[in-house]
Every structure is written in structure tokens, then in C-alpha cells.
Image: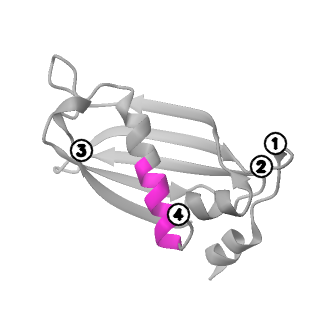
Amino acid sequence: MKIDEIQIRVRYGETDQMGVVYHGNYALYLEMGRVEWLRKLGVSYKMMEESGIMLPVVSLNINYKKSASYDDVINVKTQLKKTPTIKIEFDYEITNKKGEILTTASTVLVFIDMKTNKPTKAPQYLLDLLVG
């Protein structure tokens, strides 16, 4: 399935007193990867919301292997797990400049109709972009 990669430089404010990335910031890195994955496909969260679809995270699993530190450049690889239905699932791998795996993760998001606040099928325009 479609894969995208982005690079992020760790900012000082993302680290703890030991100079390593605070564990909660990895969820932000995953979101940045996911947003860019969608954007490069031709879809934005803003566009989806304007068309009446929200995409909340319903599951997040992170496995920490090694630490990232202030000023490190990390690579976030985002991969679609399977064709979206009412949910969309991603796998992630965060590595350092040496290619060492720092973190692996997965997320599940659900397409929500903003009018009914209930799950709905993936928008057809997204499915069409995945085939194209």
C-alpha cells in the first residue's frame, strides 16, 4: 500500500530533562506523517472536514526501541495498512539518520459523518485517489 516519508528535526521543547524526546510527542510525529501522507495523495484534513467528514484516532499503539534527542533529524515512514472502509489504518516506523529503528507504531482512525456523528464509509474521492 502507499508509503510516504517525512523528516522532522527534534526541537528542544519536545525533550525532557534528560534531553530525549518525551514519549507523548511521538503521537504528534505520527500525526505529522499521516497528514503529509494524505496531503501528498491530494487530500487534506481541512478538505475532509469541509465535506462533512471527521477522522478521529480510535486506537494508537507505540513501541519504543531507542531514544531520539534534541536536534536529531528523524524519519517518519507512514504506510497505509489496507484499503479504507469505515476506518483507515496506518503503520509507522521512525528511524534516526543511521537508519536505526527508534519507534514502530500503528493507528486506527474512523471516518465520522459530522452531521450524524456516526461512522461512515471512506469518501469515494479518497478511494479513487488510492486506486489512481
Residue where numbered disc 3 is placed: 100
The quarter of the image holding the N terminus is: bottom right
Instruction: Count neighbours of disc 1 (C-alpha within 10 A) and say few if under 14, some if 14 to 19, many if 20 or more.
Output: few
Q: Nearer the viewer, residue 41 or 45?
A: 45
From mark 4 to mark 3, how far is it between C-alphas? Answer: 25 Å
From mark 2 to mark 1, how far is it between C-alphas? Answer: 5 Å
Residue 131: percent from left, percent from top: 66, 78
Which numbered tag is attached to residue 38? 4
Inspect the image, locate mark 3, and give the three-letter code of the amino acid beneath it.
Answer: Glu
Range of residues picked out in magenta: 32-41
Which of pointers 4 and 3 lies earlier in the amino acid sequence? Answer: 4
Residue where numbered disc 2 is placed: 114
Which numbered tag is attached to residue 117? 1
Q: Nearer the viewer, residue 104 or 8?
A: 8
Which numbered tag is attached to residue 82? none
- Residue at left offset 75%, top offset 60%: 122
Label pair 4/3, CB-CB below 8 angstroms: no
Residue 67 in view in this figure? no
Q: Quadrant of residue 85?
A: bottom right
The single residue placed furthest to the bottom in the displayed view is 132
Circle 1 sits in a helix, a strand or a loop, which is it?
A: loop
Instruction: Count neighbours of disc 4 (C-alpha within 10 A) and say few if under 14, some if 14 to 19, many if 20 or more.
Output: some
Please identify, in this view, whether the residue under mark 1 or under mark 4 is nearer the observer: 1
Circle 2 sits in a helix, a strand or a loop, which is it?
A: loop
- Residue at left offset 54%, top offset 74%: 42
Which of pointers 2 and 4 lies earlier in the amino acid sequence? Answer: 4
Please identify, in this view, whether the residue under mark 3 or under mark 1 is nearer the observer: 1
Q: Nearer the viewer, residue 72 or 95?
A: 72
Label pair 2/1, CB-CB below 8 angstroms: yes
From mark 2 to mark 4, how far is it between C-alphas? Answer: 19 Å
Q: Quadrant of residue 36?
A: bottom left
Please identify, in this view, whether the residue under mark 2 or under mark 4 is nearer the observer: 2
